[in-house]
Amino acid sequence: MFDWLSVHRADFAAVLILLLVVAFVASIYKGVHYSILRKNDEVFGDPERTKGGWYWAVTGVSTILLLWFFFSWGMARAYFPNAANEMCQIAKIEEAISPIKARLPIGSRYYKSTILVVRNAQQLETLEENIPSAVFSASELRQIDTALAQTNSLINILSDPSKQSEDTRQALAQITADIEAIGERLDQGYDGLEVSEEGRNQPRWGVTDTEIPLIPMTARGMMFDEVSVQAKDITTAFLKLRNLPDDAKTTIASTKAILADLKDAAKDSSGWTEADVAERGRFIKALDRIFKRLDDGIIFPSEALAGVNSSIETLYDKIDDAQGSLGIVDALFFPGHGVVKSKTLCIEQGSSRWLPKPFDVVAKFGKLANPDLENGGGYKGTTLLWWKWLPIADVVDFIIPDMLVDALPGSYGTHGDDGSFMPTYKDKVLAFAQGDVYLGSIPMLDGHIWDSLFRVIVAMAFGICLGVPLGIYMGVSRFFKSFFDPMIELYRPVPPLAWAPLILTIFGIQDDGKIFLLFMVAFAIMVISARTGASGTQLSKIRASHSLGASNQQILRNVILPNALPEILTGIRIAIGVCWGTLVAAEMLAGTTGIGFIENVARTVSDYELIWVTILVMGLLGLMFDLIMRKVISITIPWRGKG
């Protein structure tokens, strides 16, 4: 069933997109309608004015999802499922002729021949001006002058159209004619072409690891594929073409001989210092490097390639014409750089490269959420979120530290003279504390998500239990504020990740290190929140309580704590968000489970779908925490904003 849903994910996306458009339009209409009706009943700044408005939430969610579908090419795949395959065939043509384009202005503004001529001429001029005469003999200097002059003359020979051989002219004319011929083939259209059975049986776009089907799936795609094969043959012939007139061959042979003599002479170190030998070798190597960029015959007269450049431009115009409606679809529904052919694959470019389609992310999440590890579910041998039987002894081992047992009176047992061992009561308590006593098992959540949630929940519990009382007393006591304030303010501004390497080094990569790091984050936030709330209590309320005979404990419990509660609850909301972000970073630094661990592995292998799954999971869990805190706040301090 899940496989069928995965194969037809584009069909479901098409239906969902239509529903999102309807929801977007309807929610805007309803929102505007309600705003007009309630315009005279609401006062700007009233907190009650912000309640409700679910229709604007629908507008926001539908807008985000529609933009996601558009920029991820999910909309294009839903309504134009064969468009990417046809664009793949066009990308094959682009790949085939790109080596030709690289030598023409249409591909890089200048002829490659022009770039080579200008660059090498400038380097020859610089080399000639900086000849280290002191490290060469007179005869060697004459050879260098000759090599420089001949290399310069080689540039002139290769650039002179009058010296170009007739065979080269005819070969370039044939290449121009062949390019024009494939352009005429595009003019003929694709009537009569039939898709091969292999092409028809390919998996749908995006269903398998192959991003876009490579074999043509439509008649138009067949036409472009046929042209790409012909273009590849033309490119092969062009790349084999060389411009080597007889004068150039003579000059090349002579210059090679001179450079060979200079290289042999440079190896002779007699009479030269080590620095001189190094300088001689450097100069000759630089001269030889320039010469080798010229002796392969890829420099052509500029007018010789004008016909090829013009035919390529015409071919692109014909490709645009042959696309027909595909060109409109490409412009409207494929934001970015379109489809690119890379070796044996056609891949998406632009925003769709790093922004997977929504239903692809859902499919990836479904695979991760599958608890059947043996059949590919979960991730790295751990489920995403499931349950297991947890021994109660493991919980006891986690809660009770061994040092409490060490503090008990008495001593641990020792073995007797006959080698027997009789445990004392302290040995039995230690076995209990270490989880060595079977106490049964209970069902418990398990998986990457639960591991992350567990770390945050435990750290927040410690942070609240220790941070709130300390913050309250810092708000009412001069001693507590003066004693603890420097300590808190010393470590609070330090980014949590700055502590991570130290804490993970001390505690290791197990849960206790991550929990302690999160506790440090939550503790500071809770202390500041509670202190701010306690110190912000109105003095008139406190004096009134004293005048009515209230004790310090009663004032603390009934006046100061309720006054600090809004700040405390707000601090919890902030602490959860900061802890969640810190946890993911800590799991990325060191961890074998958790959402951050999954994202870190996905990042190293550039699995964008998995990265987005982890981002959405983290966002949804963060939203869940925040919604819970909103509900808690509405229940515990319903008076907030109404005083």
Image: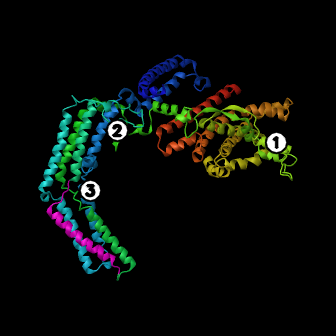
52 or 630: nearer the viewer: 630
Residue 126 seen in the current view: no
Element carrying mark 2:
strand
| Residue positioned most to the bottom | 271
Identity of the residue drawn at 82% across and 48% down: 406
Of marks 1 and 2, which one's residue comes earlier in the chain? 2
Q: Choose mark 3 or mark 2, whichever is in front.
A: 2
In front of the other: label 1 or label 3? 1
Position of residue 253 measured from the top left corner of the image (x, y, whole percent): 20, 67
Q: Earlier in the sequence, mark 1 or mark 3?
A: 3
- Residue 284 lies within the magenta run: no
Question: How far from the left and from the top, in percent, is residue 289?
Answer: 30, 65
Q: CA distance from mark 3 to mark 2?
A: 29 Å
Quadrant for the C terminus, please. top right
**Is there CB contact under 8 Å for labels 1 and 3?**
no
Residue at 18%, 57% in the rendered image: 243
What kind of residue is marked 2?
Val
* Residue placed under numbered mark 2 in the picture: 339
Q: Position of residue 371 (x, y in %)?
A: 57, 32
Q: Which residues are magenta?
A: 241-269
Left or right: 342 as drawn, with respect to 358: left
Image mark for residue 115: 3
Q: Are marks 3 and 2 in contact (CB under 8 Å)?
A: no
Q: Amino acid at mark 1?
A: Val
Which residue, given by chain and number where applicable, does mark 1 sit on? 429
Distance, label 1 to label 3, CA atoms, is: 84 Å
Determine which quarter of the picture holds residue 312. top left
User: Could you tell me if the residues under marks 1 and 2 are in contact, i.e. CB atoms within 8 Å?
Assistant: no
SS for callout 1: helix
